[in-house]
Image (cartoon, grey):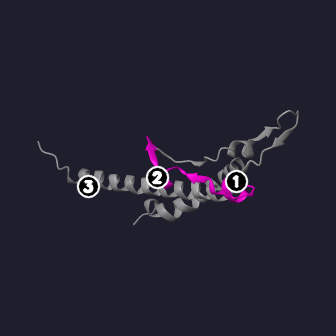
Amino acid sequence: MSCDTKGFEELMRNLENEQNRIDDFCKDCSIRIVSEVFKKAAKRSPVDTGTLRRGFTITDNLEMSKIGDTFKTSVTNNTSYADYVEFGHRIKNSDKFVDGFKMLSTAEDEVRNVIPTYLERRMKKEFGDMFTNG
């Protein structure tokens, strides 16, 4: 008894190509999303000398790490006082508290609210052909 597996092998190649296409799509969307957070956070930063604003970076210059099915990167600010400006701080020898600017937190929230719409639009544009006959 013999079995012709050419069709199955072709299907496997097609599925592998589609998986690569999906990974590229996810990576591109992730880069665009994290870039938007970066821009909004930097724009919201208070400016005295500009050091805080220039301190925002995207991990490894937009390099994505893939862990399982998840692409990971992050926006950081290594300026020594960035956390105090973001979250606020107590004034030394006083009971007073200076509120934080929440520049990164607010940027994340704003972008998080538009991600579903953005992804839906991009998915229809990129993968519409996967769901049409012909």
Residue at horizontal 46%, vertical 59%? 131
Q: Give the amino acid at mark 1.
A: Glu
In the rendered image, residue 73 lying in the magenta stretch gets the answer no
Q: Residues within 10 Å of mark 2 (few under 14, many from 20)?
A: some
Q: Secondary structure at mark 2?
A: loop
Residue in the picture at 58% in, 62% down? 121
Identity, as a three-letter code, of the amino acid under mark 2: Glu
Q: CA distance from mark 1 to mark 2?
A: 23 Å
Relative depth, front residue between 21 and 65 = 65
Instruction: Identify the disc placed on residue 63.
Output: 2
Is residue 51 shown in magenta? yes
Residue in the image at 71% along x and 58% along y: 49
Q: Which residue is mark 3?
A: 10
Q: Quadrant of residue 17?
A: bottom left
Instruction: Please tell me whether mark 1 or mark 3 is closer to you in this view.
Output: 1
Magenta residues (range): 41-69
Q: Which mark is residue 110?
A: 1
